[in-house]
Amino acid sequence: MATPRTVAIDGPAGAGKSTIGALVAERLGYLFLDTGAMYRAVALAARRGGVDPDDAAELGRIAREVRIAIGPPTVRDGRPYTVLLDGGDVTWAIRSADVDRIVSQVARIEAVRDAMVAQQRALAGRGRVVMVGRDIGTVVLPDAERKIYLTASAAERARRRGEELAARGEVRSRQELLREILRRDRLDSERKVSPLRPADDAIVVETDGLTVGQALDKVLQVVTRTEAGQTT
Ligand code: DC
């Protein structure tokens, strides 16, 4: 089996990047880093500090000063990993509707991205890492040996998000979730700095209608094969 040093997985909100990425990392015995959780932690810190999500200078300062740590789950409550913000457990707090609403705004600020990308590159330096996000294959790790662009239709992604929230007791209408997904797609792909797009050498994996197991198999095939360079 040919295993790459680094695996980059990008794609829009709700495509299954975190679920699939964590499973791929587990299979390979690699470190898993969900970079979306880092932007979410900065957004949460901004909210808690009463900072306007349009205040670029203040958000940049927060991004440089907060301590974000992502590691294996410390509580068995269904979480794929634990996220600490200045030592406090924010694993679920970063998934709240409040954070959902402002995170794309926070993530488009250059100073925030600079601070996050520096940390992400440092973490990937030793290799054996699966990193997921929006700009991993294009900006953070342009030399990653495997690049996957995981995607699904907006309707499918809204459905999955609804199920995920329902499992945690939060009921939201499918229409509202679809609107949110489309809004975040737009903000993530139209921003000036590091917009969401597949890297030229990424392999696109569509997951509509696939179970988690099927999507995982598809991604593992791409990750472990010797030659990359085609759409699946
Ligand atoms: O993957 P997610 O939904 O948890 O990401 C949260 C937000 O962070 C999303 O709006 C896009 C942004 N993000 C980004 O700009 N770059 C990344 N590498 C990861 C996430």
Image (cartoon, helix red, strand yellow):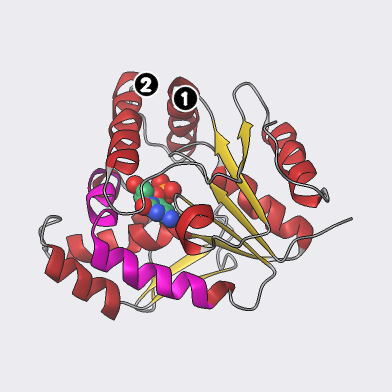
Residue behind mark 1 = 159
> What is the distance, in whole Å, between disc 2 and disc 1 at their CAs?
7 Å
The location of residue 86, given as percent across then percent down, is 34, 78
Q: Which residues are magenta?
A: 100-122
Residue 3 belongs to the span the image colors magenta: no
Determine which residue is flagged by label 2.
174
Kindly identify the residue that appears in the image at 59 percent across and 77 percent down. 125
Examine the image and state in which quarter residue 43 appears.
Answer: bottom left
Front-most of residues 223 and 47: 223
Q: In what quadrant of the picture does the N terminus appear? A: bottom right
Instruction: Report the residue at 47% width, 25% height from top.
Output: 159
User: Does mark 2's beta carbon lie closer than 8 Å to ligand 1?
Assistant: no
Q: Is 213 above or below relative to 173?
A: below
Question: As shown in the figure, which amino acid type bears the numbered disc 1?
Answer: Arg
Q: Is residue 127 left or right of residue 191?
A: right
Residue 126 percent coordinates (x, y): 64, 78
| Magenta stretch encompasses residue 117 | yes
The mark tally for this picture is: 2
Residue 147: give x, y in percent of width and height: 62, 50
For this rendering, which residue is in front, 21 or 203? 203
Looking at the image, which residue is at 75% across and 61% down? 4
The residue lying toward the viewer, choosing from 197 and 131, is: 197
Instruction: Give the vertical position of 170 relative to 138 (above or below).
Output: above
Q: Are marks 2 and 1 in contact (CB under 8 Å)?
A: yes
When the figure is inspected, residue 46 is found, relative to residue 175, above or below; the finding is below
Report the amino acid beneath label 2. Arg
